[in-house]
Image (cartoon, rainbow, N blue to C red):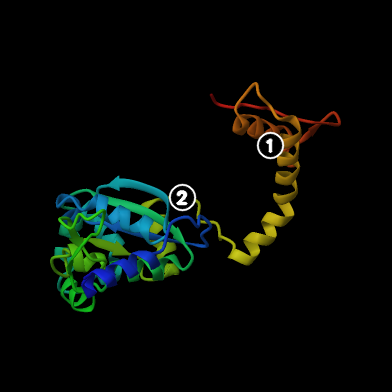
Amino acid sequence: MVSESIKTELKFKEQAPTHAKVVYTELTLALIKPDALKAGHDREIRYAMHAHGFVIVHEAYIKFTSVRAGIFYDHHRGKPWFQRLTRFMSSGPVHGFVLGKERAARSWNVVIGPTDPEQARKESPLRLVLLIGFMNFSHTRRSCSSLRARFGRDILRNAVHGSFNAARARQEIKFIFPNVVMDPLPDPPKARITFDKTLKRTLIMGLTALCKAKPYSEPLKRWFARWLQEHNPNRPYIDGKRYVEVVIPD
């Protein structure tokens, strides 16, 4: 008989979000802090990003100096633990991410949990549950809980950082990744309108041409890519003819 904890885990897995939805309307900053990197939790935290539907727009390993850490956490300046925080954040490399998703900042803060790992563990306790698979009950793993509940040690070494809100996320991304484009992203209805007006007709024409041509001399995706470049409605005109420069990588 399957235990209640296993049933709960299976139910969660069935309802778990996927990363199939690529359209995102908000960006947020996520940092894997030195303690979590040193402990080898990088891969698991990255997996959690995908599992909860985030798109990794940009990522890089960075190294804070104590001065830059102080600027980044300037809103905490004057607090008794400020110096310890800047020393900790400059003690080793940090893995930074720009994450995209609808309501990204709010969603990421739910995934990482409260600042204090002890409080996070009270809200989402760690449990070991059995994984069922072809009569094999020997494997275990942690049930899904917040990242700070799983990997945090204390308020200072709490594994991950997340921007407080969308406005703060824009400031932090600009500070950490100044080359990332932060143009406003359309909400889903506006994105659909833009797609219908600018892309849908061209894609339908291209797919129709592909069906009629039935190319055998090159892969279908290569043929379609070439057609899209040759029929790009945004290509400029030169001497009454559309200028086309087609470069299709092998």
Badge 1 amino acid: Leu
SS at mark 1 in the image = helix
Q: Nearer the viewer, mark 1 or mark 2?
A: 1
Residue tagged 2: 180
User: Total number of numbered labels?
Assistant: 2
Image-quadrant location for residue 246: top right
Res. 78 visible in picture: no
- Whichever of labels 1 and 2 marks the residue nearer the N terminus, that label is 2
Q: On the picture, is 10 further left or further right than 212?
A: left
Kindly report the distance in space between the C-alpha atoms of the residues bearing marks 1 and 2.
27 Å
Cβ atoms at labels 1 and 2 below 8 Å apart? no
Image-quadrant location for residue 139: bottom left
**The residue positioned farthest toward the right in the image shown:** 240
Q: On the picture, is 189 further left or further right than 211?
A: left
Crowding at mark 1 (Cα within 10 Å: few <14, some 14-19, many 20+): some
Quarter in which the N terminus is drawn: bottom left
How far across and how far down the image is residue 212, in percent?
76, 34
Q: On the picture, is 150 further left or further right than 240?
A: left
How far across and how far down the image is residue 55, in percent?
44, 54
Compared to 61, does 68 lie above or below? Answer: below
The numbered disc on residue 167 is none
Res. 119 visible in picture: yes
SS at mark 2 in the image = loop
Crowding at mark 2 (Cα within 10 Å: few <14, some 14-19, many 20+): few
Residue tagged 1: 228
How far across and how far down the image is residue 237, in percent?
80, 34
The structure residue drawn at horizontal position 28% and vertical position 50%, both measured from the top left corner, is: 95
The structure residue drawn at horizontal position 32% and vertical position 64%, both measured from the top left corner, is: 162
Badge 2 amino acid: Val
Residue in the foreground of this view, choosing between 215 and 154: 215
The structure residue drawn at horizontal position 71% and vertical position 41%, both measured from the top left corner, is: 207
